[in-house]
Amino acid sequence: MKTREEIVSYLKGLRSRICEAFEKVEREGGGTGRFERKDWSYSKGAGGGEMSVIRGQVFEKAAVNWSGVEGAKFPGDDASGPFFATGLSLITHMSNPKAPTAHFNIRYIEAAPAGGGAGRRWLGGGFDLTPMGFPYDEDTRQFHDAARAALDPFGKELYPRFSQAAREYFTIPHYQRERGVGGVFFDHFSTGDLERDLAMWRGVGEGFLPALLPVLERRIAAPYSEADRQTQLKRRAQYVEFNLLYDRGTQFGFRSGGNAEAILCSMPPLAAW
């Protein structure tokens, strides 16, 4: 799987499977929410993306977004010439405070020097779990075990390396602590063997649902109080702070001239300070 078309096809297929799985969780939890899709076009080059958003009784809001854009100038310090970037990114904000927020992203980027010459290709992604004030050890263990199972076929060293990277990346500096219970994270990943790298990247993509769904099944029907809801809203505020101040994906989206609505899909429907 080396061509852009094959990579985009995989991402869109994964997007559809995740949306179907989330809609099933919504139905089984007594909700009626369905994903609504909306296309957008890239204003600074070719391509665009598709937003998929559900607002229901189980998922207060979840977004599963695909994008694929190319332009004349890479919006970062890694390169300066033409680029192509495609990825899948999602966020879940649950109605039940006992059910955690989850984030997932995988991306593929090509970039070339401004003056021509050999370009670079790299991969990034990962997934992490953020309890909204109510962490459960069994959920954390299960989530991390699934992450390890997704990565171990490609090297036993990857899970410890990517898990540590997640701890470092998903830290909120102004609170001097992690925003959640971690997961896995990698960026600028390239060993020189693109086919093997893409296999690992797909492994992360395939590992997300097995990591998250058992957690949701345990928590979406748990009893909670209004005080629990207020705790959830305050923790969501901290999530907003991280995404707006520190998240590289948010910064890349705005710097590249991406669609603001799609970039800000990660914001919760309600939060409290």
Image (tube, grey):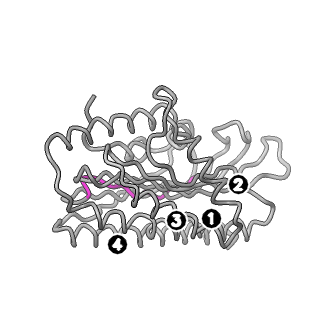
Q: Earlier in the sequence, mark 1 or mark 2?
A: 2
**Observer-nearest residue: 72 or 269?**
269
* Main SS of residues in magenta: strand
* Real-space CA distance between mark 4 and mark 2, rounded to the nearest whole angstrom: 29 Å
For residue 24, above or below residue 142: below
Q: Amino acid type of disc 2?
A: Phe
Q: Nearer the viewer, mark 3 or mark 4?
A: 3
Pinpoint residue 242: horizontal percent, then vertical percent: 45, 35
How far is mark 3 from mark 4, CA to CA? 24 Å
Question: Taking 270 as reference, is 140 left or right?
Answer: right
Residue 37 vs 240, above or below: the answer is below
Q: Earlier in the sequence, mark 3 or mark 1?
A: 3
| Residue matched to label 4 | 20
**Furthest-right residue in view?**
117
- Helix or strand or loop: what does disc 4 sit on? helix
Segment colored magenta: 59-69
First of labels 1, 4 by sequence position: 4
Q: Is residue 193 left or right of residue 136?
A: right
Q: In the rendered structure, find residue 201 and report the number of the disc placed on it.
A: 1
Q: Mark 2 and mark 1 in contact (Cβ < 8 Å)?
A: yes
- Tell me the SS state at disc 3: helix
Give me the residue at 40% from left, 54% from top: 102
Q: Are marks 3 and 2 in contact (CB under 8 Å)?
A: no
Q: Is 84 or 1 nearer to us in this picture?
A: 1
Residue 60 lies within the magenta run: yes
- Circle 4: residue type: Glu
The tag earlier along the polypeptide, 3 or 4, is 4
Hey, what amino acid is under mark 1? Trp
Q: Which residue is mark 2?
A: 189
Query: Of tags 3 and 2, which is closer to the observer?
Result: 3
